[in-house]
Image (cartoon, grey):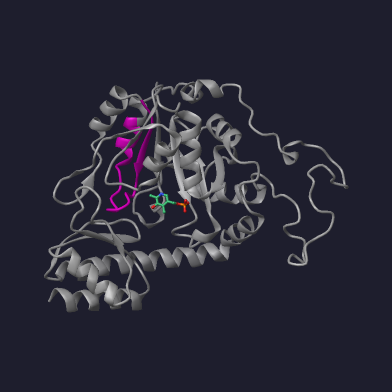
Amino acid sequence: MNAFRSSDPLLLMREDLHGFVGYRSARSESVRGDAWLNANEACDRSSADPSGAVRRYPSPQPEGLVARLARLYGCDPARLLVGRGSDEAIDLLVRAFCAPSRDAVLATPPVFGMYAVSARLHGARVVEAPLFDDGEDFRIDFDAVAQAAVALHAKLVFLCSPGNPAGGVAPREAVVGLARRLDGRALVIVDEAYVEFAEAPALVREVAALRNLVVLRTLSKAHALAGARIGCAIADPDVIAALRRCQAPYPIPASSAEVAVAALSPTSLETTASRITATKQARDRLRESLRMLPGVRRVYPSQANFLLVRFADAEGAWRALCNAGIVVRDMRAMPRLHDALRITIGTADENARLLAALRGALA
Ligand SMILES: *Cc1c(COP(=O)(O)O)cnc(C)c1O
């Protein structure tokens, strides 16, 4: 039915890392025994850790957590890498696939800053295919992305959907089309940090057919575990294995794995689902209220848990919020966002306070 066949994504990896096996930790050797004297851990627990939960190094990829995440996202466990937030996955992708000073990372500004930060730190070039604003929303110019990626030799193309900071979703067919078009040339990475708040289905199920597609997911936003630092890359099993070889030996603290496993229990997932529903409703209500305020120029149609708002007097709005003790994200230093603030959806009380403060200032 479908003649398209992706090529081997490992051909895109840094040439000097072909054959690289990474660090072989004591935990990566599969041996059996009941006296573990191979990793130089202490022989007794700390008085601060009476249960002994953290005396030993943790599993590099905690099996129970990987299994639950794979079930949650609907993928094979071999397609999933757990990292210290999706930030770590971004960093690993850049390090594994971009040769410093030579290869490039493509980003679509205005967008989440970590793609460019990881690239800069690694010495990779950053090339841009800016979003275009059609008067209603920021959108990805897929043709411009494909052309720039090819012309400027981008190995990694980062898309953010829903986009941070505006909250719009990239059409699935367009992402799939881009991945096919860049097959053999670049990985297309879709950062879905906020997809739980969106109406669109997630892209994970496309990963099986498109070997150069990578999806990033995180427990930091919808699952309310930002402090645990648990995020994932979902991709071709060979890409996942390659990223593992570039990762630190024990990236996931035992306590983080434990709280994440608990957060993925059926009862906890129910609570999460109702919080997501409530957040989406609050977002849509807050958007309507903000749009009625006289000094508000535009509120972008968000499918995330934040709103990007343009003000006639952004400085006045910012100062009114500061004076009311309300901290929002100042976007004004970003190109094309000189009049914009990004507001995270808060509790009912916080949202009401925010509206009251803005009403007072903008009236
Ligand atoms: C918050 C955010 C992340 C970071 O997620 P972590 O898993 O906490 O590292 C990634 N991408 C985008 C677009 C974000 O807004």
Residue depicted at x 51% and y 24%: 10
Residue depicted at x 24% and y 77%: 357
Question: Where 284 sits versus 244, above or below?
Answer: below
**What count of labels does the image hold?**
0
Residue depicted at x 46% and y 41%: 90
Question: Where 266 sits versus 214, above or below?
Answer: below
Tell me the magenta residue range: 154-178
Residue 189, quarter of picture: top left
Instruction: Tell me where residue 321 appears, x and y as whole percent.
Output: 26, 72
Instruction: Tell me where residue 136 appears, x and y as whole percent.
Output: 16, 52
Asked whether 87 falls inside the magenta stretch, the response is: no
Quadrant of the image containing the N terminus:
top left
Is residue 179 shown to the viewer in this render? yes
Residue depicted at x 51% and y 20%: 15
Question: Where 173 sits versus 35, above or below?
Answer: above
Instruction: Tell me where residue 205 appears, x and y as whole percent.
Output: 45, 40
Instruction: Tell me where residue 218 appears, x and y as whole percent.
Output: 48, 51
Which one is nearer the viewer's eye here, 23 or 252? 23
Quadrant of the image containing the C terminus:
bottom left
Asked whether 174 falls inside the magenta stretch, the response is: yes
Residue 103, quarter of picture: top left
